[in-house]
Image (spheres, coloured by chain):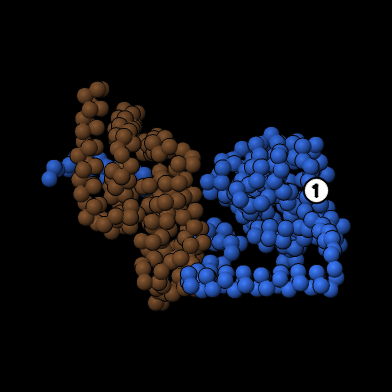
Amino acid sequence: VTEHTDLEARLRAYGAELRDSLRTDDLSIRVVAAVRISPRPRRRLSRTVRIAIVAAAIFVLLASASYAGYRVFFVAGPVTVHTEPSPDLAIGTRLRLGAPVHLGDPRLRIPVVTPHVGWIDSAPEVWFDEAASDQVSLTLPPERALPEIGTSGVGLLIQEFDGDGREAIRKYVTTSTRTETVQIGGRPGVFLSGGEHTLFYLDTTGKYVVSPGRVVGNALIFQRGQLTIRLEGQLPRDRMLELANSLR
Amino acid sequence: MRMTDDATLVSRARDGDADSFAELVRRYQDIARRVAAATGGVDIAEDAAQEGFVRAFGALATFRDDRAFRPWLLSIVANAARNHRRAHTRWDRARLRAVERDASVATASPEETIEARDTRRSLARAIDALPRAHREVVACRYLMDLSEQETAACLGVPTGTVKSRLARALDRLEVILRKELARD
């Protein structure tokens, strides 16, 4: 066995300096802020139970479809079914945005703004959560100019919060994120790229509200009047700025 | 007051009790920061440790009750730190920035400052030149002062492997430093 006494001593001295540079404050505050919003971890069902549930669901689906088809054919005769596009409820549930509403819904307490740029064809779907009534979320589906963010089924997510996010623009909790200060209408904002982030803002009662990013894409956070606005999308900075400036 | 054991806190956290998880974070935050620094670099240790805890919370459902929480957590933090480093900055750059900062604050005379900085820089460069497996074991054991058991948990290898890998890493590090000295 080779002796490395001197080398070991130098490594230990170097390590002591590096360890001194690590923070020692309470990390739990930031961790808990992030996990309080996350869905509660659930125990995974056993493989047998999962297979049984899937089989039962398929059986019920097939049975009801057969019965519906039988009834339509023998009772109503040949029919034409018209369907209208409806909001994808799965998006609202998956991203914890609440229930679909229309822009004139009286429960919306804040002046909602929407993007107006020539390169987006779709109209936004609007989401509202009774438990977080100081905010509203808008989603746009993926399209040519709005690449899907991961596998979220969303091309752009806009969240508008009734509160002061200026502090968040100066200082924010981020993980895996690069940040860049930008100007929107002469006021500062922050562009975050490359990973997850958490926004916090002061609500109208003066309490901090913590809101993690709902999708892992790029994000632009800025203050506009009484609103703190966050755009999340798989778009470069300039496109995000164009969207932000078009909100009205 | 008797300290609640990890298993109880994990069970409560799994039922959505964030305060229990906060207790686990406080219990292991220092070691998590050192593991993150060893595998990802000092500059990203804070973010990576935080990310590791958040990931661990999300993965509590998959945690088996017959396992110990601490090594399970440390392996998650180590992976989070490696991913963080890949996504952001190279390990050596982060390390060197830390070296510059450390060397700039602590010493007495300008000559000592320069000498200390040069020594640390050559050591940091030599560590950076090691293969990842060797670099991590050196960083865990010497730089972050982790025990053999903690290093094993962090690297996901048996303690016997930690010993043998460390011996080979030190041999290699000596060779690199000698070459560097000869070049200078």
Q: From the viewer's perspective, is A188 left or right of A101?
A: left
Quarter occupied by the N terminus of chain A: top left
Look at 49% across and 40% down and name the residue there: B88
In the rendered structure, the answer to whether residue A37 lies left or right of residue A84 reads left
Q: Quadrant of residue A238?
A: top right
Q: Is residue A170 visible?
A: no
Where is A210 relative to B11, above or below?
above
The one of A39 and A19 positioned closer to us in this rendering: A39
Identify which residue is drawn at 68% across, 54% down.
A201
- What is the quadrant of residue B70 in the picture? bottom left
- How many numbered callouts? 1
Question: Quick check: B156 left or right of B169?
Answer: right
What percent of the width, then of the height, locates residue A186? 75, 36
Task: Tell me the quarter of the image containing the C terminus of chain A.
Answer: top right
Indicate the chain on which mark 1 is placed.
Answer: A
The residue wearing badge 1 is A123
